[in-house]
């Protein structure tokens, strides 16, 4: 019962971050699940972590998307287009994930590098004091969606995150999309991307056993559902707070958390 409560609270914190920053909560879901599976001595802990983490991200992003819809801050066309492009990236990344060349060390290095890169981009953006609501911007083009979604989907399948930590900076920095719009678009895209990801891994052969008996393929629902439930509730709160907290504080907060999590993961393999 105590472990269940802890997972619910961790999921709540991750969901709030998902709503605030458009990161899908995976920045917390993935390391927590990795430590759980590795500590339990589960075979192929990386694949279990990524599959279960993508399911958690799906639930958290869904909650945040509903809130974005209620706030009339949703971009259906761009989000669906980005998600479909991301599903292609997920499929490509899954081929690498299930190969013999992607072990725990590669996973930690890749995930940590992704976190540090996103932190660097967000920290720089947080120093921008301009008013994004006064800026002129155009809808994302297909080429931009392909690049953003492809990279986000590839990262999602190798790191067990929603890809928002990469897609939001790309849209915000390179394609000059307003931060809050980028968050909304990424949530919709993530739902499509991560569904394709955990769905494929649920059907992937070779899974022996997770840390609970409630598993399908490499998705451990017994571990993922408590995190997901907390993430769903937190996602609503985070999306609401997104409009009440200054943008630079959101971006700096993301950068600090990403650096701390990367440091913890790297320390674990030294």
Image (cartoon, rainbow, N blue to C red):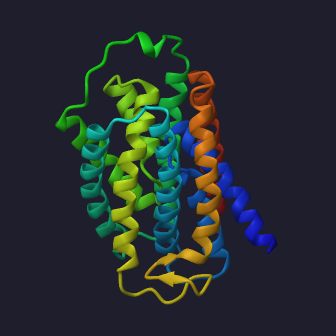
Judge from the rendering whether residue 24 lies leftward or rightward of residue 146; answer left or right. right
Measuring from the top left, give residue 159's x and y in whole percent: 46, 58
- Quarter of the image for the C terminus: give it: bottom right
Judge from the rendering whether residue 145 lies leftward or rightward of residue 214; answer left or right. left
Note whether 216 is above or below 270 in the view shown.
below
Nearest to the observer: residue 37 or residue 247: 247
Residue at 30% across, 49% down: 83
Note whether 36 is above or below 186 in the view shown.
below
Residue at 34% across, 35% down: 75
Residue at 39% across, 54% down: 191
Residue at 60% across, 30% down: 250
Note whether 216 is above or below 184 in the view shown.
below
Residue 161 at least partly seen: yes
Measuring from the top left, give residue 183's x and y in whole percent: 45, 36
Measuring from the top left, give residue 112's x and y in whole percent: 53, 51
Residue 270 at least partly seen: no
Nearest to the observer: residue 237 or residue 203: 237
Judge from the rendering whether residue 80 lies leftward or rightward of residue 119; answer left or right. left
The residue positioned farthest toward the left in the image shown: 142
- Quarter of the image for the N terminus: give it: bottom right
Note whether 53 is above or below 204 in the view shown.
above
Nearest to the observer: residue 209 or residue 1: 1
The residue positioned farthest toward the bottom in the image shown: 208
The residue positioned farthest toward the right in the image shown: 2
Judge from the rendering whether residue 116 lies leftward or rightward of residue 178; answer left or right. right
């Amino acid at each position: 019962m105590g472990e269940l409560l802890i997972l619910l609270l961790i999921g709540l914190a991750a969901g709030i971050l998902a709503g605030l920053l458009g990161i899908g909560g995976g920045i917390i879901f993935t390391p927590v699940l990795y430590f759980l599976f590795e500590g339990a001595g589960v075979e192929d802990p990386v694949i279990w972590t990524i599959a279960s983490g993508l399911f958690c991200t799906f639930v958290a992003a869904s909650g945040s998307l509903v809130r974005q819809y209620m706030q009339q801050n949703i971009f259906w066309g761009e989000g669906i287009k980005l998600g479909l492009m991301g599903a292609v990236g997920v499929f490509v990344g899954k081929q690498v994930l299930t190969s013999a060349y992607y072990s725990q060390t590669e996973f930690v290095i890749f995930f940590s590098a992704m976190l540090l890169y996103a932190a660097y981009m967000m920290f720089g953006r947080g120093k921008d004091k301009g008013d994004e609501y006064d800026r002129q911007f155009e809808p994302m083009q297909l080429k931009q969606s392909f690049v953003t979604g492809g990279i986000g989907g590839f990262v999602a399948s190798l790191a067990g995150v929603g890809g928002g930590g990469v897609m939001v900076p790309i849209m915000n920095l390179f394609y000059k999309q307003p931060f809050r719009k980028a968050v909304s678009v990424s949530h919709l895209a993530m739902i499509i991307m991560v569904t394709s990801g955990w769905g494929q891994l649920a059907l992937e052969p070779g899974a022996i056993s997770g840390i609970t008996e409630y598993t399908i393929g490499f998705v451990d629902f017994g571990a993922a559902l408590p995190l997901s439930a907390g993430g769903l509730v937190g996602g609503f709160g985070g999306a609401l707070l997104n409009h009440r907290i200054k943008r630079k504080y959101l971006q700096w907060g993301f950068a600090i958390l990403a650096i701390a999590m990367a440091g913890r993961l790297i320390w674990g393999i030294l």
